[in-house]
Amino acid sequence: MRKDGALMVTFQQTQQPVCCHGCLAVLNTIQSNGLVEQYLQSKQINESSSPR
């Protein structure tokens, strides 16, 4: 993750840092298409099934 000149996106009314323009575009697309709930559910499933 960038520290200087970090890219920021407003996601769910909160400023969040992102690593690149691609991630910024993906999060904006998720929000503009009303897919936030599905994204968060998918992210939660993926994080809980990842080996630690």
Image (spheres, rainbow, N blue to C red):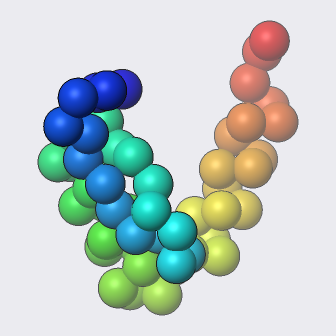
Considering only vertical position in the picture, is 34 above or below 52?
Answer: below
Left or right: 25 as drawn, with respect to 18: left
Instruction: Identify the residue at image location x=65%, y=50%.
Output: 43
* Residue at 45% from the left image edge and 54% from the top image edge: 16
Q: Give the x, y percent position of residue 42.
A: 66, 56
Q: Position of residue 4 (x, y in %)?
A: 23, 29
Question: Which sits in the foreground, 44 or 24?
Answer: 24
In the image, residue 30 sits, relative to residue 34, either above or below, namely above
Locate residue 42 relative to residue 26 in the image: left or right: right
Residue 12 rendering spot, x and y as whole percentages: 55, 75
Identify which residue, 20 or 14, lies in the foreground: 14
Quadrant occupied by the C terminus: top right
In the displayed structure, does residue 8 sit left or right of residue 52? left
The image quadrant that residue 19 belongs to is top left
Q: Residue at x 72, y 62 (%)?
A: 41
Is residue 10 found left or right of 21 in the rendered image? right
Report the number of discs: 0
Q: Quadrant of the N terminus?
A: top left
- Residue sitting at x 48%, y 87%: 34
* Residue farthest toward the top in the current orientation of the protein: 52
Along the viewing direction, whichever of 29 and 49 lies nearer the viewer: 29
> Quadrant of the rendered structure where residue 28 is?
bottom left
